Image (cartoon, rainbow, N blue to C red):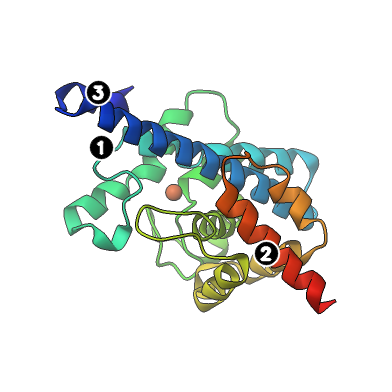
Amino acid sequence: MEFFGNLHNCESSEQLKREVENDLSDAIQHGMLVSILARRLAIELDKSREFCNDMAVAGLLHDIGKMKLSRYLYWRREDALDDEEMKYVRMHPTLSYEVLRTHGYSKRILDAIYYHHENFDGSGYPKNIKEYSIPEGARILRVCDVFAALISNRSYRSAFDVDTAMELMIEEVKNFDMKIFLAFQRMVNADDFINVVYASFLEKDEEISNSIRKYLDSIDEIK
Ligand SMILES: [Fe+2]
């Protein structure tokens, strides 16, 4: 894999190997979380069983193109990158599409992945398309991807709790299809949300589990 090619030239290869393994572990966990959320959101939107399953696959694989990016850019905060680096990072949906295109995935899955960074108001990438010209699967992934990133720890910040994540998303609601966002809110507020995400998640990711548990406890207190 090209991603590991960089390791050979590195002086502290053990440390770098550990960092790469952490990155991969984060990437896999992020993919799992987006997968669980996207499938569940598709169910909330009353989509067919096939559509829901496609969302699970697309969620898991949407960022696979990042594996082709240099480790120096991987998972770094977008606003800390210069223009050239940003251009590079923004290639990842296209790289994901290119990696998966010859492996027999449905058009729905490939479209969802290719357009998962398009914003509803047209401010996203790679094609700057907007509103309903963005495939529905990509509009679903967009909401789930942002939420999953916010409730996860990053190298430059701690995870937000679910309440704060939802508030931050409301501030940026122009990026989302409102019907899909409202369905997502219903899903997050549902009694079984803990079973949907927390129980489905790897034990290791205690931060996500804790923030979700805290949120659900606070709902219980209100009731
Ligand atoms: Fe992405």
Determine whether the residue tagged by mark 2 lies in a helix, strand or loop. Answer: helix
Q: Is residue 214 above or below residue 200?
A: below
- Determine contact: label 1, label 3, CB under 8 Å: no
Q: Report if the CB atoms under discs 3 and 2 are less than 8 Å apart.
A: no
Q: Residue at x 38, y 55 (%)?
A: 127
Residue at 35% from the left image edge and 58% from the top image edge: 156
Measure the C-alpha gap from mark 3 to mark 2. Answer: 41 Å
Identify residue for label 2. 214
**Element type where label 3 sits in the image:** helix
Query: Observer-nearest residue: 82 or 219?
Result: 219
Q: Which mark is drawn over residue 5?
A: 3
* Mark number, residue 70: 1
Q: Quadrant of the C terminus?
A: bottom right
Sort mark 1 into few (<14), some (14-19) or many (20+) by Cα contacts within 10 Å: some
Q: Residue at the spot x=62%, y=39% of the render?
A: 202
Tag 3: amino acid: Gly
Q: Is residue 135 visible?
A: no
Q: Residues within 10 Å of mark 2 (few under 14, many from 20)?
A: some
Foreground of the two, 181 or 24: 24
Left or right of residue 177: residue 42:
right
Q: x, y percentage for residue 141?
A: 57, 52
Please provide percent x and percent y for residue 15. 27, 32
Residue positioned 70% across, 46% down in the render: 39
Quadrant hosting residue 105: top right
Where disc 1 sits, the SS reads loop
Q: Quadrant of the N terminus?
A: top left
Q: Find the distance from the CA under tag 1 to the CA under tag 2.
A: 36 Å
